[in-house]
Amino acid sequence: MRPVYLDNNATTRVDPEVVSAMLPFFTEQFGNASSMHAFGASVGDALRDARKQVQALIGAEYDHEIIFTSGGTESDNSAILSALDTQAGRDEVITTVVEHPAILSLCEHLTKTRGTVVHKIGVDSMGRLDLEAYRKALGPKTAIVSIMWANNETGTLFPVDLLAEMAHEAGALFHTDAVQAVGKIAIDLKSTEIDMLSLSGHKLHAPKGIGALYVKKGVRFRPMLRGGHQERGRRAGTENVPGIIGLGKAAELALKHMGEEQTRVKEMRDRLEKGLLQQVGSCFVTGDPTNRLPNTANIAFEYIEGEAILMFLNKAGIAASSGSACTSGSLEPSHVMRAMNIPYTAAHGSIRFSFCRDNVEQDVDQVLENMPQIIAKLRELSPFWQGDGSAPAEFNPTFA
Amino acid sequence: MWDYTDKVKDYFFNPKNSGVLEGADGVGDVGAISCGDALRLMIKVDKDTQVITEAKFQTFGCGSAIASSSALTEMIIGKTIEEAMTITNQDIADFLGGLPPEKMHCSVMGFEALRAAVANYKGEEWEDDHEEGALICKCFGVDEGMIERAIRGNHLTSIEQVTHYTKAGGGCSTCAESIEEVLAKTNALMVEEGTLAASEAFDPSKVVRSSAKPGQPKVSPLAPAPKPVATAKLTTLQKIKLIEQAIEEIRPFLQADGGDCQLVDVEGDVVYVQLTGSCVGCQMASVTLNGVQERLVEKLGFPMRVVPVKTNH
């Protein structure tokens, strides 16, 4: 049985072509790009090429708008901290309730340590942003808006073009955490007003530990890490050369396969979703089905719990993920499910399947073969399941 | 992935005694769907010998919740009620070859379900017998008695352990102080009784709180000098006015759901509010409180904590 990997929003397999591109930079072209000799010079050229490859993937106007970082989290942190330092007279942050912890934990920290006012904009039951609340939160105190391009759990896309324009009208900078969007949907930054964008290598078949922050030309930037003059003084530290080369190659491949995401990958996702909704009752798709990533399906199954589903899936050789409490070690369902007000009867049973170009139709078949019986088995065990999907059975907990 | 023992996996993938027990003599329900796990234990008891002849379970929950439930049924079948009641949550965990610390609450759920089922069999009245306020964790419906039993039964000495074993404090965590009180009180009693070494007992004075106290904010070495916090500039009256204003703005949303919120008192950076109407006892009350807190922080521009006060019936 072929293992079925459908957790590509968590991380992706490094493409073998990416590995081949990286290998010479460990043992042959191992020089430091800053060195004044041939070893360094050839590495410098390779870094330039990689920067251009990333530039092409996100449609940046200039290659020097790309700053290589250690990944999405560093990019997110750098963007917000820089804006708070450079936006004179402005000290508020606007973000959303469904952001990644790389944004939310930082904001919490800033509120606690500096008293930074953070406005978190809510979403509706389909995960769509409350534009009215956003409009109201924007003001002369707003230093930066940070809103994700695509949600990692549901794949729901936010209208970042429009949101960036609104931020600029209020004189604020606009940053987007596009870790889930880059490589999956076409992005052309030069035609937008987005000031900063974070991306992560391991979400697009490059290795872990490499990412980038795009900073539009003309936007003031203050580095988070200080030291050497690498990345034009905007990110100190000797370059992760093999990682950068890998990210460059992965960006080139992502661009090459972009059409496939919207066709073959999307069709597999849609077939899986349709099949599950047909074969398994009492479940529904979370997020905005008309406006989301082509690779992500998030389905909430009522009256059962996600970790239990994942354990059975794992036994059947299928890897997926869940927004349930138990899988993370926390005790409440994911903040994204709660923000969308997904009823508790289903929030604990949400399962995310995320595809990539490596997946094949057979993977969909395998899930469709296994899932109905897994769900049926767990529902049989559940005291809330009535057999026909009607309201949950009466349950009277006693405080003994 | 959790590091489950083979026995946990076996009892999860092939649970014994699952399903509905028709004509059960005692039924115990614990947990709730909103909490992420719930267990219904059903037992049949021989009236003459008081032996549990049959036991079945239905569980909504994760792998270890289902395995713990199934293990419990295996452990009590053939035992008298009296014998069964000596089973502790640790016995259930041991039976399964151990559980990850974060999952110990699954074994406690089994322990509590057995108590509930036996009480139901004996026809005892369990209906909300705890005194007002004894419900400590409102997110997960955990009362003082359950926390105390878990502390005693498992020699717990930290808040984190209490959360792992009972889930109490794992949601909005506004009950952290109440848990500390129960922990300190129970540990002190255990030391007196000689079941716990004084050096191991929970010491409330050593608790490190994550939220910064006014006047001495924690500062990361990476962070630039903190801006002066606005607190100093506001008089208590100004604060109260701003808070009232913020609550006014939220009120329509609460009222739409049949609830309401009143300001009770302000002490430094602690704001006491009372949730009324359908907010009382609502599983989402903690989420509501978080919303109120966020709105207040926005409005006043400095961190504060919103604390719910008891409702007077």
Image (tube, coloured by chain):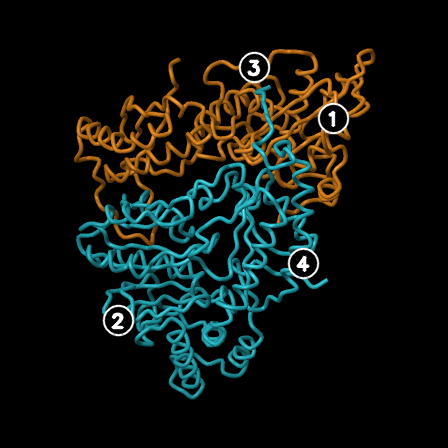
Residue placed under numbered mark 4 in the picture: A366
x, y percentage for residue B44? 76, 20
Residue B63 at x, y percent in the picture: 65, 41
- Is residue A356 or residue B187 the one in the foreground? A356
Label 4 element class = helix
Badge 1 is on which residue?
A: B21
Apparent side of residue A32 relative to residue A63 in the rendered image (left or right)? right
In screen coordinates, is B6 left or right of B138? right
The residue closer to the viewer here, A350 or A219, is A350
- Tell me the amino acid under the disc marked 3: Glu
Q: Report the label total.
A: 4
Residue B28: name its quadrant: top right
Q: For residue B127, which numbered disc appears in the image?
A: 3
Q: Are marks 1 and 2 on the same chain?
A: no
Between B57 and B83, the one lying in front of the other is: B57
Q: Earlier in the sequence, mark 4 or mark 2?
A: 2
Tag 2 residue: A217
Three-letter amino acid code at disc 2?
A: Lys
The label shown at residue A298 is: none
For marks 4 and 2, give the CA distance.
Answer: 48 Å
**Mark closest to the chain's N terminus, 3 or 1:** 1
Q: Colour of chain A?
A: cyan
